[in-house]
Amino acid sequence: MSNKNVVTLKKLAKELGVSISTVSRALANHPDISNETKARVDEVSKRLNYIPNLFAKGFRSHKTYTIGVIVPDISHYFTATLIKGIMQEAEINGYKVIVSESKNNEYKQAEMLQTMNQFGVDGVLLSLARTTTNFDEILNTLNIRPLVLFDKVSTKVPCTQIVIDDEDAAFRAVEHLIQLGKKRIAIIKESEGSFNSEMRYKGYLRALNTYKIEVDESIIMNAVEISMQQGKRLTTVMLSMKNTPDAVFAITDTLAIGVIKALNNNKISIPDEIAVVGFSNNISSIIIEPKLTTIDQPGNKIGEIAFRYLLEEIKSDSKLICKTVEIKTNLIVRDSSFRTASIDISL
Protein backbone atom coordinates (compact mmCIF):
# COMPACT_ATOMS: atom_id res chain seq x y z
CA MET A 1 0.00 0.00 0.00
CA SER A 2 1.39 3.41 -0.95
CA ASN A 3 1.75 6.12 1.66
CA LYS A 4 -0.98 8.27 0.07
CA ASN A 5 -3.54 5.58 1.05
CA VAL A 6 -2.46 5.40 4.68
CA VAL A 7 -4.92 7.18 6.96
CA THR A 8 -3.01 9.34 9.43
CA LEU A 9 -4.07 11.53 12.34
CA LYS A 10 -3.52 14.50 10.02
CA LYS A 11 -5.99 13.11 7.46
CA LEU A 12 -8.53 12.37 10.18
CA ALA A 13 -8.19 15.89 11.54
CA LYS A 14 -8.69 17.39 8.05
CA GLU A 15 -11.78 15.23 7.44
CA LEU A 16 -13.28 16.26 10.79
CA GLY A 17 -12.21 19.91 10.64
CA VAL A 18 -10.46 19.77 14.02
CA SER A 19 -6.86 19.84 15.22
CA ILE A 20 -4.57 16.80 15.22
CA SER A 21 -4.24 17.01 19.00
CA THR A 22 -8.06 16.89 19.37
CA VAL A 23 -8.21 13.72 17.27
CA SER A 24 -5.36 12.17 19.22
CA ARG A 25 -6.95 12.92 22.58
CA ALA A 26 -10.36 11.74 21.40
CA LEU A 27 -8.90 8.40 20.31
CA ALA A 28 -7.19 8.12 23.71
CA ASN A 29 -10.56 8.80 25.45
CA HIS A 30 -9.18 11.95 27.09
CA PRO A 31 -11.64 13.49 29.63
CA ASP A 32 -11.21 17.00 28.15
CA ILE A 33 -12.82 15.91 24.89
CA SER A 34 -16.62 15.87 24.69
CA ASN A 35 -18.50 12.62 24.11
CA GLU A 36 -19.96 14.11 20.93
CA THR A 37 -16.49 14.78 19.49
CA LYS A 38 -15.27 11.34 20.56
CA ALA A 39 -18.24 9.75 18.78
CA ARG A 40 -17.52 11.73 15.59
CA VAL A 41 -13.84 10.80 15.65
CA ASP A 42 -14.71 7.16 16.28
CA GLU A 43 -17.18 7.08 13.37
CA VAL A 44 -14.79 8.72 10.88
CA SER A 45 -11.76 6.63 11.98
CA LYS A 46 -13.76 3.42 11.42
CA ARG A 47 -15.13 4.60 8.10
CA LEU A 48 -11.67 5.49 6.81
CA ASN A 49 -10.15 2.33 8.34
CA TYR A 50 -7.67 4.23 10.50
CA ILE A 51 -5.01 1.98 12.08
CA PRO A 52 -2.97 3.51 14.94
CA ASN A 53 0.78 3.56 14.46
CA LEU A 54 1.95 1.59 17.48
CA PHE A 55 5.56 2.76 17.28
CA ALA A 56 4.67 6.43 16.79
CA LYS A 57 2.38 6.15 19.79
CA GLY A 58 5.16 4.47 21.74
CA PHE A 59 7.58 7.24 20.81
CA ARG A 60 5.22 9.83 22.31
CA SER A 61 4.29 7.88 25.44
CA HIS A 62 7.62 6.03 25.85
CA LYS A 63 5.59 2.80 25.95
CA THR A 64 4.49 0.41 23.21
CA TYR A 65 2.69 -2.10 25.46
CA THR A 66 4.66 -4.74 23.59
CA ILE A 67 7.23 -7.20 24.91
CA GLY A 68 9.79 -9.29 23.05
CA VAL A 69 10.22 -13.03 23.67
CA ILE A 70 13.30 -14.88 22.37
CA VAL A 71 13.50 -18.68 22.62
CA PRO A 72 16.11 -21.16 21.31
CA ASP A 73 13.75 -23.46 19.40
CA ILE A 74 10.09 -22.70 18.82
CA SER A 75 9.29 -26.24 17.61
CA HIS A 76 9.64 -27.92 21.02
CA TYR A 77 6.41 -28.80 22.83
CA PHE A 78 7.73 -27.38 26.12
CA THR A 79 8.63 -24.10 24.42
CA ALA A 80 5.09 -23.88 23.06
CA THR A 81 3.69 -24.20 26.60
CA LEU A 82 6.05 -21.45 27.82
CA ILE A 83 4.94 -19.08 25.05
CA LYS A 84 1.28 -19.88 25.65
CA GLY A 85 1.65 -18.96 29.33
CA ILE A 86 3.38 -15.69 28.42
CA MET A 87 0.77 -14.74 25.82
CA GLN A 88 -2.16 -15.53 28.09
CA GLU A 89 -0.81 -13.35 30.87
CA ALA A 90 0.19 -10.59 28.42
CA GLU A 91 -3.30 -10.45 26.95
CA ILE A 92 -4.85 -10.12 30.40
CA ASN A 93 -2.59 -7.11 31.03
CA GLY A 94 -3.11 -5.45 27.65
CA TYR A 95 0.29 -6.31 26.14
CA LYS A 96 1.22 -7.63 22.71
CA VAL A 97 3.98 -10.21 22.29
CA ILE A 98 6.64 -10.42 19.57
CA VAL A 99 8.11 -13.95 19.53
CA SER A 100 11.44 -14.73 17.88
CA GLU A 101 13.68 -17.80 17.63
CA SER A 102 17.45 -17.76 18.09
CA LYS A 103 17.80 -21.28 16.61
CA ASN A 104 20.21 -21.95 19.49
CA ASN A 105 22.70 -19.57 17.89
CA GLU A 106 24.16 -16.84 20.09
CA TYR A 107 24.84 -14.56 17.10
CA LYS A 108 21.22 -14.87 16.00
CA GLN A 109 20.23 -14.23 19.61
CA ALA A 110 22.22 -10.98 19.66
CA GLU A 111 20.62 -9.97 16.35
CA MET A 112 17.14 -10.61 17.75
CA LEU A 113 17.91 -8.52 20.84
CA GLN A 114 18.99 -5.66 18.60
CA THR A 115 15.75 -6.00 16.64
CA MET A 116 13.67 -5.94 19.84
CA ASN A 117 15.50 -2.81 20.93
CA GLN A 118 14.86 -1.17 17.54
CA PHE A 119 11.15 -2.02 17.87
CA GLY A 120 11.19 -0.25 21.22
CA VAL A 121 9.60 -3.08 23.19
CA ASP A 122 8.89 -2.31 26.83
CA GLY A 123 10.81 -5.37 28.02
CA VAL A 124 12.34 -8.67 26.94
CA LEU A 125 11.87 -12.27 28.08
CA LEU A 126 14.89 -14.32 27.02
CA SER A 127 15.60 -18.05 27.12
CA LEU A 128 19.29 -18.40 26.30
CA ALA A 129 20.71 -20.13 23.25
CA ARG A 130 22.70 -23.24 24.13
CA THR A 131 26.20 -22.52 25.41
CA THR A 132 25.91 -18.73 25.10
CA THR A 133 29.41 -17.33 25.73
CA ASN A 134 29.09 -13.69 24.66
CA PHE A 135 26.76 -11.73 26.92
CA ASP A 136 27.51 -8.21 25.58
CA GLU A 137 24.22 -7.66 23.74
CA ILE A 138 22.25 -9.12 26.65
CA LEU A 139 23.95 -6.76 29.09
CA ASN A 140 23.47 -3.83 26.68
CA THR A 141 19.75 -4.58 26.53
CA LEU A 142 19.58 -4.89 30.31
CA ASN A 143 21.02 -1.37 30.59
CA ILE A 144 18.20 0.20 28.54
CA ARG A 145 15.10 -1.87 29.34
CA PRO A 146 13.84 -4.60 31.69
CA LEU A 147 15.03 -8.08 30.79
CA VAL A 148 14.10 -11.34 32.53
CA LEU A 149 15.69 -14.71 31.80
CA PHE A 150 13.52 -17.82 31.92
CA ASP A 151 14.03 -21.58 31.53
CA LYS A 152 17.57 -21.43 30.07
CA VAL A 153 19.48 -18.96 32.21
CA SER A 154 22.97 -17.96 33.34
CA THR A 155 24.55 -16.62 36.51
CA LYS A 156 26.52 -14.21 34.28
CA VAL A 157 23.45 -12.05 33.69
CA PRO A 158 22.47 -9.89 36.72
CA CYS A 159 18.69 -9.98 36.28
CA THR A 160 15.60 -11.75 37.54
CA GLN A 161 15.55 -15.40 36.44
CA ILE A 162 12.61 -17.82 36.37
CA VAL A 163 13.67 -21.47 36.57
CA ILE A 164 12.91 -24.88 37.98
CA ASP A 165 15.38 -26.59 40.31
CA ASP A 166 16.87 -28.80 37.57
CA GLU A 167 19.41 -30.41 39.87
CA ASP A 168 16.92 -31.42 42.53
CA ALA A 169 14.37 -32.63 39.97
CA ALA A 170 17.01 -34.85 38.34
CA PHE A 171 18.10 -36.11 41.75
CA ARG A 172 14.53 -37.22 42.52
CA ALA A 173 14.17 -38.89 39.12
CA VAL A 174 17.34 -40.94 39.60
CA GLU A 175 16.50 -41.61 43.25
CA HIS A 176 13.20 -43.10 42.06
CA LEU A 177 15.12 -45.54 39.84
CA ILE A 178 17.48 -46.45 42.68
CA GLN A 179 14.55 -47.13 45.00
CA LEU A 180 13.20 -49.56 42.41
CA GLY A 181 16.42 -51.53 42.82
CA LYS A 182 18.22 -50.22 39.72
CA LYS A 183 21.99 -49.98 40.23
CA ARG A 184 23.48 -49.39 36.80
CA ILE A 185 21.78 -46.17 35.70
CA ALA A 186 22.84 -44.49 32.48
CA ILE A 187 22.28 -40.82 31.64
CA ILE A 188 21.85 -39.17 28.25
CA LYS A 189 22.75 -35.48 28.43
CA GLU A 190 23.79 -32.74 26.01
CA SER A 191 27.35 -32.92 24.74
CA GLU A 192 27.62 -29.12 24.53
CA GLY A 193 26.86 -28.72 28.23
CA SER A 194 23.93 -26.28 28.37
CA PHE A 195 23.03 -24.84 31.78
CA ASN A 196 19.96 -27.08 32.15
CA SER A 197 21.83 -30.19 31.03
CA GLU A 198 24.68 -29.56 33.46
CA MET A 199 22.29 -29.00 36.38
CA ARG A 200 20.46 -32.25 35.59
CA TYR A 201 23.79 -34.06 35.31
CA LYS A 202 24.76 -32.71 38.74
CA GLY A 203 21.50 -34.07 40.14
CA TYR A 204 22.25 -37.47 38.58
CA LEU A 205 25.72 -37.57 40.13
CA ARG A 206 24.42 -36.45 43.51
CA ALA A 207 21.85 -39.25 43.55
CA LEU A 208 24.48 -41.88 42.75
CA ASN A 209 26.85 -40.51 45.38
CA THR A 210 24.09 -40.26 48.00
CA TYR A 211 23.21 -43.93 47.54
CA LYS A 212 26.85 -45.05 47.25
CA ILE A 213 26.55 -46.19 43.63
CA GLU A 214 29.77 -46.02 41.66
CA VAL A 215 29.79 -43.62 38.71
CA ASP A 216 30.53 -45.47 35.45
CA GLU A 217 31.81 -43.10 32.77
CA SER A 218 30.97 -45.62 30.03
CA ILE A 219 27.22 -45.10 30.52
CA ILE A 220 27.36 -41.31 30.68
CA MET A 221 26.16 -40.67 27.14
CA ASN A 222 26.41 -37.34 25.31
CA ALA A 223 23.87 -36.35 22.65
CA VAL A 224 25.08 -33.90 19.99
CA GLU A 225 21.48 -32.74 19.65
CA ILE A 226 18.25 -33.23 21.56
CA SER A 227 16.40 -35.59 19.24
CA MET A 228 14.62 -38.92 19.21
CA GLN A 229 17.22 -40.20 16.74
CA GLN A 230 20.01 -39.45 19.21
CA GLY A 231 18.13 -41.28 21.94
CA LYS A 232 17.76 -44.34 19.71
CA ARG A 233 21.39 -44.21 18.55
CA LEU A 234 22.87 -43.93 22.03
CA THR A 235 20.61 -46.70 23.34
CA THR A 236 21.88 -48.97 20.56
CA VAL A 237 25.42 -48.15 21.71
CA MET A 238 24.53 -49.07 25.31
CA LEU A 239 22.88 -52.33 24.26
CA SER A 240 26.10 -53.35 22.52
CA MET A 241 28.02 -53.13 25.79
CA LYS A 242 29.00 -56.29 27.66
CA ASN A 243 27.46 -54.89 30.84
CA THR A 244 24.30 -53.03 29.79
CA PRO A 245 22.55 -50.53 32.07
CA ASP A 246 19.41 -51.50 33.95
CA ALA A 247 17.93 -47.98 33.73
CA VAL A 248 18.29 -44.82 31.65
CA PHE A 249 17.68 -41.24 32.76
CA ALA A 250 17.37 -38.91 29.76
CA ILE A 251 17.47 -35.15 30.31
CA THR A 252 14.53 -34.60 27.93
CA ASP A 253 11.45 -36.61 26.97
CA THR A 254 12.46 -36.46 23.31
CA LEU A 255 15.64 -38.40 24.08
CA ALA A 256 13.79 -40.75 26.43
CA ILE A 257 11.20 -41.61 23.76
CA GLY A 258 14.07 -42.47 21.43
CA VAL A 259 15.39 -44.77 24.18
CA ILE A 260 12.02 -46.53 24.51
CA LYS A 261 11.73 -47.00 20.73
CA ALA A 262 15.19 -48.57 20.57
CA LEU A 263 14.43 -50.87 23.52
CA ASN A 264 11.12 -51.90 21.95
CA ASN A 265 12.85 -52.60 18.63
CA ASN A 266 15.31 -54.86 20.46
CA LYS A 267 12.52 -56.56 22.45
CA ILE A 268 13.95 -55.38 25.79
CA SER A 269 11.38 -55.56 28.58
CA ILE A 270 10.60 -52.12 30.07
CA PRO A 271 10.93 -51.57 33.01
CA ASP A 272 11.91 -55.10 34.09
CA GLU A 273 15.19 -55.25 32.17
CA ILE A 274 15.73 -51.51 31.61
CA ALA A 275 13.63 -48.73 33.17
CA VAL A 276 13.42 -45.28 31.56
CA VAL A 277 12.79 -41.79 32.98
CA GLY A 278 12.57 -38.57 30.97
CA PHE A 279 12.21 -34.89 31.71
CA SER A 280 9.52 -32.28 30.80
CA ASN A 281 6.25 -34.26 30.46
CA ASN A 282 5.96 -33.82 26.72
CA ILE A 283 2.58 -34.74 25.22
CA SER A 284 4.31 -37.71 23.56
CA SER A 285 5.17 -39.15 26.98
CA ILE A 286 1.63 -40.53 27.31
CA ILE A 287 1.40 -41.70 23.68
CA ILE A 288 4.53 -43.87 23.62
CA GLU A 289 4.22 -47.46 24.93
CA PRO A 290 5.04 -48.03 27.66
CA LYS A 291 4.02 -44.59 28.92
CA LEU A 292 7.01 -42.56 30.07
CA THR A 293 7.86 -41.69 33.66
CA THR A 294 8.97 -38.07 33.61
CA ILE A 295 9.53 -34.81 35.46
CA ASP A 296 6.60 -32.47 34.83
CA GLN A 297 7.86 -28.99 33.92
CA PRO A 298 4.89 -26.61 34.21
CA GLY A 299 5.72 -24.55 31.10
CA ASN A 300 2.48 -22.59 31.16
CA LYS A 301 3.07 -21.53 34.76
CA ILE A 302 6.72 -20.64 34.10
CA GLY A 303 5.64 -18.42 31.19
CA GLU A 304 2.93 -16.69 33.24
CA ILE A 305 5.28 -15.98 36.15
CA ALA A 306 8.07 -14.79 33.84
CA PHE A 307 5.69 -12.23 32.32
CA ARG A 308 4.47 -11.07 35.73
CA TYR A 309 7.99 -10.38 36.94
CA LEU A 310 8.85 -8.57 33.71
CA LEU A 311 5.70 -6.45 34.00
CA GLU A 312 6.61 -5.59 37.59
CA GLU A 313 9.97 -4.29 36.37
CA ILE A 314 8.38 -2.39 33.46
CA LYS A 315 6.04 -0.59 35.87
CA SER A 316 8.65 0.07 38.55
CA ASP A 317 10.41 3.43 38.74
CA SER A 318 13.03 2.14 41.14
CA LYS A 319 15.81 -0.38 40.61
CA LEU A 320 14.53 -3.83 41.54
CA ILE A 321 16.56 -6.45 43.35
CA CYS A 322 17.40 -9.29 40.97
CA LYS A 323 16.08 -12.61 42.16
CA THR A 324 15.94 -16.26 41.14
CA VAL A 325 12.41 -17.64 41.22
CA GLU A 326 12.16 -21.44 41.34
CA ILE A 327 8.97 -23.15 40.14
CA LYS A 328 8.18 -26.52 41.71
CA THR A 329 8.06 -29.68 39.60
CA ASN A 330 6.50 -33.11 39.96
CA LEU A 331 7.74 -36.62 39.19
CA ILE A 332 5.03 -38.44 37.27
CA VAL A 333 5.54 -42.19 37.58
CA ARG A 334 4.26 -44.24 34.65
CA ASP A 335 4.82 -47.69 33.15
CA SER A 336 8.38 -47.10 31.90
CA SER A 337 9.62 -47.37 35.48
CA PHE A 338 6.86 -48.96 37.51
CA ARG A 339 4.24 -51.65 36.87
CA THR A 340 1.26 -49.91 38.46
CA ALA A 341 -1.23 -47.12 37.86
CA SER A 342 0.40 -43.74 37.20
CA ILE A 343 1.12 -41.71 40.30
CA ASP A 344 2.20 -38.11 40.80
CA ILE A 345 4.98 -37.42 43.32
CA SER A 346 5.49 -33.77 44.25
CA LEU A 347 9.13 -32.79 44.50
Image: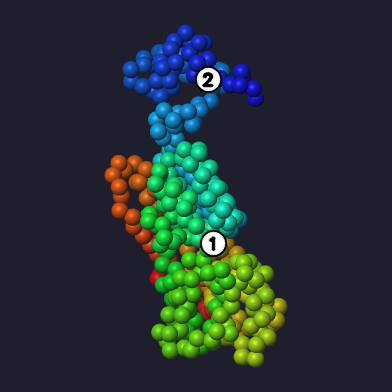
Circle 2 packing at 10 Å, graded few (<14), some (14-19), many (20+), is some
Amino acid type, residue under disc 1 in the picture = Arg
Q: Nearer the viewer, residue 213 or 339?
A: 213
Q: Kindly identify the residue that appears in the image at 44 percent across and 75 percent down.
A: 203
Determine the residue located farthest toward the left in the rendered image.
318
Where, quadrant-wise, is the C terminus in this rendering? bottom left
321 left or right of 96 in image: left
Q: Position of residue 18 (x, y in %)?
A: 44, 10
Q: Tag 1: Cα neighbours inside 10 Å, few (<14), some, or many (≥20)?
A: many
Q: Element under label 2? A: loop
**Rendered position, 16 above or below 329:** above
Task: Give coordinates of residue 23: x percent, y percent.
Answer: 44, 17
Between 104 and 334, the one nearer to me in the picture: 104
Q: Given the current orientation, which residue lies at the most extreme right position?
A: 265
Residue at 69%, 82% (x, y): give it: 267
Query: Is residue 307 something that shows in the picture?
Result: no
In the drawing, what numbered circle is on residue 130? 1
Q: Which mark is residue 110?
A: none
Residue 223 in the image, given as x and y percentages of width and height: 61, 72
Give residue 36's quadrant in the image. top left
Q: Residue beneath label 2, please? A: 8
